[in-house]
Image (cartoon, rainbow, N blue to C red):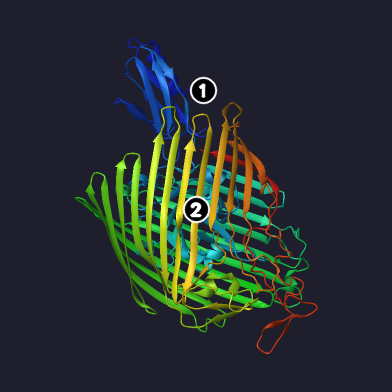
Amino acid sequence: MILRPSQFILLFFLSFGSHAQTSIIGTVTDGIAPVPFANIYLKGTEKGTSSDENGSYTLTNLNEGRYILVVSAMGYSPFRTTINMTKNRTQLLDIELEPSTETLDETVVTGTLKAVRRSESPVPVEVYSPTFLKKNPTANIFEALQNINGVRPQINCNVCNTGDIHINGLEGPYTLVLIDGMPIVSGLGTVYGLSGIPNSLIDQIEIVKGPASSLYGSEAVGGLINVITKNSLEAPDFFADAFATGWGEYNLDIGAKVDFGEKTDMLLGINYFNFDEIIDNNGDNFTDLTLQDRISIFQKWNFTRKGNRIFSLAGRYFYEDRWGGELQWTPEFRGGNEIYGESIYTSRWEVLGKYQLPFTEKLLLSFSYNDHSQNSVYGDTPYIADQRIGFGQLTWDKKTGKHDILVGSALRYNFYNDNTPATETADEVVIPSLFVQDEIHLAKKHSLLLGMRYDYDARHGNIFTPRTAYRWKVTDNDIVRFNAGTGFRVVNLFTEDHAALTGARDVIVTETLEPERSVNVNLNYLKKIYADNGTFISLDASLFYTNFSNAILPDYDTNPNQIIYDNLDGKSVSQGVSANVDVVFPSGFKFLLGATFQDVSQTENGISSRQILTESYTGTWNFGYDFRSLELSVDYTGNLYGPMRLPILGENDPRREFSPVWSIQNIQFTYKGLDNFEIYGGIKNLLDWTPNRGNPFIIARANDPFDTNVTFDGNGNVLATADNPNALTFDPSYVYGPNQGIRGFFGMRYRIN
């Protein structure tokens, strides 16, 4: 161990001074960098301290005897060890904390718009740190979520590979994605906006499953994902992460912190991703993976103010050029009907900020604005769209007696315009909102949250969304939560459903679509166990039930050549059970297991049917082991999905109506033996699974993407011919998993604190 000068001097005086003491000194690190402000104490005594900004700590004036030393820090698994103290002797004890994939006492804000310990939140919030993301390195958050239980990235197109996020089996449009609590990735941006958020500046990802419309308004019907960026205290001075895969994918992630005087600092993040290899392993003359060229630049400014009041301002610019299609496609064929290609140019910029008003009361102004411009062609079908979303919110946070009150007012501006027949004029609306919530501390172990939100939408009138949450802290290690609430969603089909854009099927809207509404109940149990040998176990289990009215779901079945949209005259239900088990052993072995069993169905005219592209069960796992003597860690991650109903083109379609049970598994090795460096590599998709297994083809009529040789009858139905014996049309929407097979990857991280 290398002693810091301050430690050496302290050790000298403690050991050889005239007043020798019984003491412990050392440093707390995570194996790479110091861990500042970790809590350190001796169990059963009043002796305790915290590490300084360099990770150093000192415990003095101890009695002779046997102690259990406990160390805890946000984002790390608790550390425990037994130490025997000899009178008038100073012991050196350096402590290496294990970053935890999910811990109980992290600070969360998403559930209540207040910063509280996760164990104190009345709303169940799952938290995932950058350590979790590193166990299976990806080029974007969309892919990184594949190993989170109950959350599934869904690819919606075989050609352009765009997708959305499903939570508890609900379609992507039901999921609201936030950055630092601001709804700037929504609507049109949801399809592409999850790419390009620099991983180097992510502090944690918070996930709430179930409606959150009472705080966040429309779109937070099925759940929400809040990507929280680092603050200046936690960000490294410089960070770089670069990796490449055997398929020719290249990703570079750079982050830096720059100080401008004593009161201003800036965080800079840059992400660049490139893939330009034309690969067709399944032999259908279409690219297996969309070619992409993407850059994202993120800045976050933090300003120090009197009284530690908040003032931050952030911005991001994102540009992407992606295309997929027939192997012969080049940009000169863009928008034509000779060679099929889907080409998407996306440009968006975002700004968001928070400003605490200079009053004694805690008044916080939050605001965001984004401008999304998309120029796309799907074969010879153009889709040109612009979307602008402005959002402002003022909240008043007040504690009085047993009441913790939050009152707020929000104003949202939506502008959307495209070139489709469904948008004859630009859709422009301003939605004012009022909301209030009161968390009542009924007793030491009981709290009750009551909330209500009011929105006024000129298209749909008054909208009320109440909710309630109850938390019972049975013991310090057992927490029961019950949540009930409502949600609503205003729909714009062409910003949400990629299949409506491809031109492969006609889109039929049979009526004026009314907002969807939902009612949700959720029962959650959280258990933590600290064993005497240092083992930590966390169990998180939930029962959930959501009932939708006015549900708007695409009907692929009535007419295989159409997608029919209307409000469901009946009900849509999502129900199930979900559980996570997180275990960390002092030996260096740790694992996180998750499983969800769910039933998502619609009932109309007394007939129930299973929702398309929704699995009945899913499992995730994350096994890790640290070979501490070798400075080497191994991570084995994966997921398992049960069968889901797929959008086939009628009875004669030879493709499977249901997907098989399928799994994506990965392994990674990380070496941490170099100062400030990490070197990592491994294999993705160990089983070499792709969705073409067991299918004659994935893309229907890939040889005739413009339906040149398809024959129709007078009613528009496809006729079987010698060239088309199954009466099919071109259809790239039959997709439920990635087309990428097995591939290796190698990368390096560099960090300066």
| Mark sitting on residue 740 | none
Residue 2: give its label: 1
Q: Position of residue 30 (x, y in %)?
A: 50, 34
Residue 351, image x, y percentages: 46, 61
138 sits left or right of 700 in the view: left
Residue corresponding to mark 2? 596
Residue at 73% in and 70% down? 331
Q: Residue at x 49, y 30 (%)?
A: 586
In primary-sequence order, the first of circles 2 and 1 is: 1
Judge from the rendering whether residue 81 lies leftward or rightward of residue 240; answer left or right.
left
- Tell which residue pokes out farthest to the left in this image: 401
* Residue 437 vertical position relative to residue 237 in the rendered view, above or below: below
- Secondary structure type for disc 2: strand
> Is 267 situated left or right of 246 in this image?
left
Q: Are marks 2 and 1 in contact (CB under 8 Å)?
A: no
Q: Which structural element holds mark 1?
A: loop
Residue 477, image x, y percentages: 35, 39
Looking at this view, is 537 or 206 the one in front?
537
Residue situated furthest right in the rendering: 722
- Near mark 1 (Cα within 10 A), the count class, few <14, some 14-19 or many ≥20, is few
Q: Amino acid at mark 2?
A: Thr
